[in-house]
Image (tube, rainbow, N blue to C red):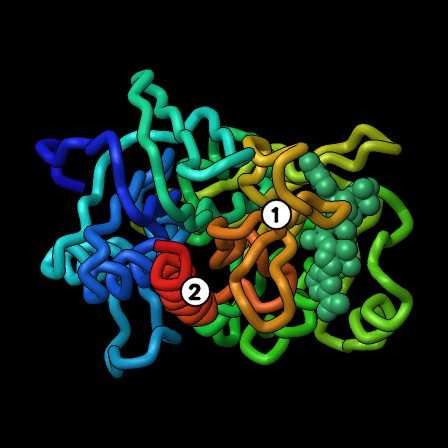
Amino acid sequence: MSETNELKSKTKVLIMGSGPAGLTAALYAARANLEPTVIAGFEPGGQLTTTTDVENYPGFPEGIMGPELMDAMRKQAERFGANCVNGEITSVDLSKRPFKIITGNGDQVEAETFIISSGATAKMLGIESEKQMLGYGVSTCATCDGFFYKEKEIVVIGGGDTAMEEAVFLTKFASKVTVIHRRDELRASKIMQERALKNDKIEFLWDSVVEEVIGNKQDGVTGVKVLNIKTDETWIKECEGMFVAIGHTPNTNLFEGQLDMDENGYLITNDKTSETNVPGVYAAGDVQDTRYKQAVTAAGTGCMAAIDAERFLEENE
Ligand code: NDP
């Protein structure tokens, strides 16, 4: 994101977040001559900047590096007049239009429409080695990275539906998948549990937590240090990859009490549109997606949000 771009105090379309949803919304809004403003957020480029090769984004037969894809999306939006600015939104007032948005620097922006594409953050275990090896054998997305683990042994952390789904999916590639769960009982729905439990390639390590990821950026992951919380024993489980599947948190704290959300904090959109319960406010990407969570679906909903905002502006000006 260019350091020199300045935040304007008024904008027709303000976009929160610069992942595939936000930048696609920016591209469409810019091509509709709406000169959108994008406030990049705490992780410019979004979750894809934490992956390496992206092989499932259409149009790149050889794959593309996540950060490179996001850089290209930003440049494409900027080429048509999107103003992408580094920074974070710290508070919003959506009670009346124009909406008032305050950034971390204390700047205030008045926005005629507001597209929220602030994404979701994969929950992590919170250990240092996991952070170091993210993108080098530690992943939070089986759909994105499973392909790199053909005939390899991997571990999946978690006991919910996401962990079961990812473990089953990963058996298509891996020679063996070991699910490491901190309790002796799964949280996942019965049907997902059954699918995982009856899969010959999946093993379970109960009452266990990962204390350290072993490996380095050159050779990748070689194992994980596991603690059995009942016996207090630690040991090294050899593996070549670790998938953390302990849930996602949608980045929606700012909207509590202002926008409708489900019980997990995801924004609720009206059937088949990007509209939230506040006219002129739209949601796109993972912040409203509990089901698909893919870069390409995020981009698709970003396009929807820009078209919805454009139509709203036409009807209300
Ligand atoms: P959940 O919150 O349901 O499960 C998270 C799992 O991770 C739990 O087993 C939890 O353990 C474990 N966990 C959480 N924090 C830690 C930690 N710090 N260390 C170790 N383990 C941890 O999240 P999911 O992402 O699995 O699911 C979210 C929602 O999405 C659910 O409603 C689910 O049903 C839905 N979903 C549905 C799918 C489908 O229907 N196909 C697919 C995927 C998700 P513990 O059990 O001990 O709390």
* Viewer-nearest residue: 265 or 110: 110
x and y percent of residue 43 in the render? 36, 39
Q: Earlier in the sequence, mark 1 or mark 2?
A: 1
Q: Residue drawn at (50%, 36%), measured in percent from left and top?
A: 96
In the displayed structure image, the side of residue 279 where residue 41 appears, left or right: left
In the image, residue 104 sits, relative to residue 95, either above or below, namely above
Q: Secondary structure at mark 2?
A: helix
| Rendered-image quadrant of the C terminus | bottom left
Q: Which numbered circle lies on residue 309?
A: none
Mark 2 packing: few (<14 Cα in 10 Å), some, or many (20+)? many
What is the x, y in percent for residue 212?
Answer: 56, 35
Q: Amino acid at mark 2?
A: Asp
Q: In the image, is 280 to the left or to the right of 176? A: left
Spot occupied by residue 107 in the image (x, y as percentages of width and height): 29, 21
Residue at image mark 2: 308
**SS assignment at label 1:** strand
Taking depth in this image into account, of 273 and 176 the one nearest to the observer is: 273
Residue type marked 1: His
Alpha carbon separation for disc pair 1 and 2:
27 Å
